[in-house]
Image (cartoon, coloured by chain):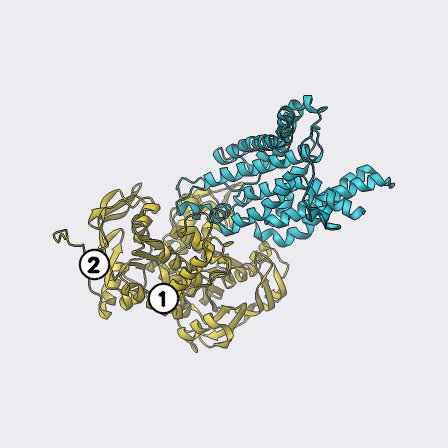
Chain colours: A cyan, B yellow
Amino acid sequence: MMIADILTGAIRSGTSVMLASQGELISERAGVINLGTEGSMLCGALGGFAVTVWTGNPWLGVLAGGIAGMLISAIHAFLVLACGANQLATGLTIMFFGMGVTSFLGRGFVSEQIVGFNPVPIPFLSDIPFIGGILFNHDPLTYLAILFVPCLWYVLFRTRLGIVLRATGERQEVLFASGINPKLVRYLAVLAGGFLAGVGGVQLSVAFTHSWVENMTQGRGVVAVALVIFASWMPARAMLGAYLFGAAQALQLTVQQQGLPISPFFLFMVPYLLTLAALLIVERKQRSLMPESLGKVFAGDGAR
Amino acid sequence: MKTDHPVKPAYLLRAAGLTKRFGSLTANEGIDLEVRPGQIHAILGENGAGKSTLMKMLYGVYEPDEGTVLMDGEPAVLYPPSRARAKGIGMVFQDFRLIPAMTVLESIALAVESGFALRRKQLRARILEVSRKYGLAVDPDAYVWQLDLGQRQRLEIVKVLLAPGTRVIIFDEPTSVLVPQEVEKFLDMLDKLRKDRYGILLITHKINEVLACADQVSVLRAGRMVYQSDQVDSGDGDKLISAMMGEKTLNPVTKQGMHGEEREPILQLKDGTIRGDHGEPVLEGVHLTLRKSEITGVAGISGNGQRELAEVLFGLRKLGTGELTIASAVMNDASTKEFMEAGVTFVSEDPIKESVIPGFSILEHMILDGIEAPVKGANIDWARAQKLLEDSEEARALALADGSRRADQLSGGNVQRMVLSRALIRKPDILIISYPSRGLDIGTTRTIQQQLIELAKQGTAVLLFSEDLDELFKLSDRLVVLSGKKLLGPYDTHETDVSRIGERMLKGESA
């Protein structure tokens, strides 16, 4: 029973990270590292929570949260792509800005209660023993999030849009020579990434915890960035990594509930430790798969 | 039906009076040119004669300062490249514009497809059809990084042929990346394109190819058309050379008295494994001996481990397994500095990227790299250093640019002159040199070739990487061939010939 609980918890707790990692993956495939993902998630979590409180409609919350995440990533896109700012420095700044601004604006929401999203068991499928409870007893947002992963794979590898996106991250000059504006592609990719991270935040506040607490993402956005590398920029692998992280979270909670004599602070550390270990194992092999111009900014004016 | 509409012009493209200036330099002046359907028009010229500028104007990369281009009897604006492409002009670049992480199919889709979802099946069928029709073997599912240069070129050609409406195809030095056997196939393919009424512009500096396939020839020298003919006869070789060279006379490269003797080995690599950038083995079981006073040439299609081998011999890359000795000292873990102290000098294959520090002058580069600088007190005596450089035989022979010029503002040829003079001035015991004549005109190429021979006579062991088989045969005492992760040879240059070496480049040991 405990294993089923942990796996169910893995999906509950990991979906926010998963969505953020898919967003970061889009952005990095186009060549922009966005360390501000954490900030986007927080903005999404607060924006989605607030709109759900005001309207009672969690779907409007999803929209609002996505837009909030997108807006803050637009700052990153502008600074990096238009002003040529350093991507890592800008991303870190955006992350702390997101923490600060949501803590400040979110003061009034800490005690609010919402209904938000609740598990909708899928008929028949959720009755399958063991697997049914783990996979088919979740909130609608989580189902959508999981369905998004194969869609993203399809777009990346089976459409012209995907080729354009990947070419942007690899050699912008080639793209420029074929008459496409790589900078525009990068803008759109960063915005899409911010939107997804925002929706990930909404999943956390509106579907998973049904509450708003300042800095509630607890580094999930940063983990999402790490996962993209761990996943060698492949959507399904990023999902796997996110749910591994989620499982560690769930394990940590279960162990705490069982009252085992392990320091809660140590348990709290476990998911991050696991992510770190995974990175160590995979990083060495995967480095060559990195998009070639990740982090580089192309003037794009044909000066060369 | 009306019959009095104007006669369809006999040309696909006609340029008149094209002029392009860069600052004070006139790269092209008053160029007239015609491309006709079903004809190959060869543009001959030395490096720096203005061939690339002309082609880039026709492909819309540069906007001409003066002159017009007519297509279908009407003036056509070709700038930027998207317009040139829309008018049916395709270009196969010398430095391929490809993305290593993509497959052949994806690379082609990026250039020729529109719409959302890819019609992979249909595109694959079209690729295979063109590939069969013109003998351009490409595997649609291979990744670009897996392809050798010949395959990359075929991919580029397929891309151009699949682009809608292509009728003029510009080839920029297409055979420079091919081995002799591939050159034949390439010329066959050109012939098929000609029969299918494509108009072809072939930029080259190889006169034999022009004589073998061209219908028309134009010769560029110093930015002007100095010779144009609608007829190409097999006996035109000398005429074309003198048109390319102008007044200049060529010193023949001579090499004597270096054949046959067993000389003292100085550098030895035994059973070496050399790994690439991603840790994959690039060369295995390498045995290589460099001897004093000997030039060892390295032949092979580029991308077969040339760069990695050169880097290992200068300590830039760690030897995987095996043993590397210089004058019997083991150098496996030696740093670049220790290699330099052991008398090794290295000229990299991409000096602009790897040997030029932006903002530094030629003189500063020289001193940075250990050319002895005269000092006045604690300071470098710049005036004297400058004079020493100017007076040095090597710099003079190579017509090195003024020592105070910033190296990052030099042309490729001048950077090449800088790194070559630097290497020669040091009089190294061992010289690892990659593609010495890349970017140089024929005259300077001969000078540097003669200098390498002189250097070897004075006792230097030279390892020469080159993609030009003629150059390798002219200079080398022995040849090794890189092919299929193996280093084959050495072969005595007096006992083998170009076609046998070419065969080994293509097929490895089995040849």
Mark 2 or mark 1: which is in front? 1
Expressed as whole percent of the image width and height from the top left, the position of residue A106 reads: 66, 24
> Does the image show residue B288?
yes
Q: Is residue B234 left or right of residue A160?
A: left
Helix or strand or loop: what does disc 1 sit on? Answer: helix
**Which amino acid type is marked by label 1?**
Lys
In the image, residue B33 above or below residue A189: below
> At numbered mark 2, what does the secondary structure look like: helix, strand or loop?
strand
Same chain check for tags 2 and 1: yes
Residue type, label 2: Gln
Residue at 31% across / 44% down in the picture?
B79
Disc marking residue B228? 2
Residue B393, image x, y percentages: 40, 56
Q: Position of residue B230 (x, y in %)?
A: 19, 62
**Residue occupying the far top of the picture:** A108
Q: Quadrant of residue B447?
A: bottom left
Q: Is residue B48 visible?
A: no
- Quarter of the image holding residue B208? bottom left
Near mark 1 (Cα within 10 A), the count class, few <14, some 14-19 or many ≥20, is: few
Vertical side of A156 occupied by B275: above or below: below
Chain containing the residue with disc 1: B
Q: Chain of mark 2?
A: B
Q: Which circle marks residue B133 in the picture?
A: 1
Q: Nearer the viewer, residue B480 or B407?
A: B480
Residue sitting at x 58%, y 53%: A288
Please report whichever mark, 2 or 1, sits nearer to the chain's N-terminal start: 1
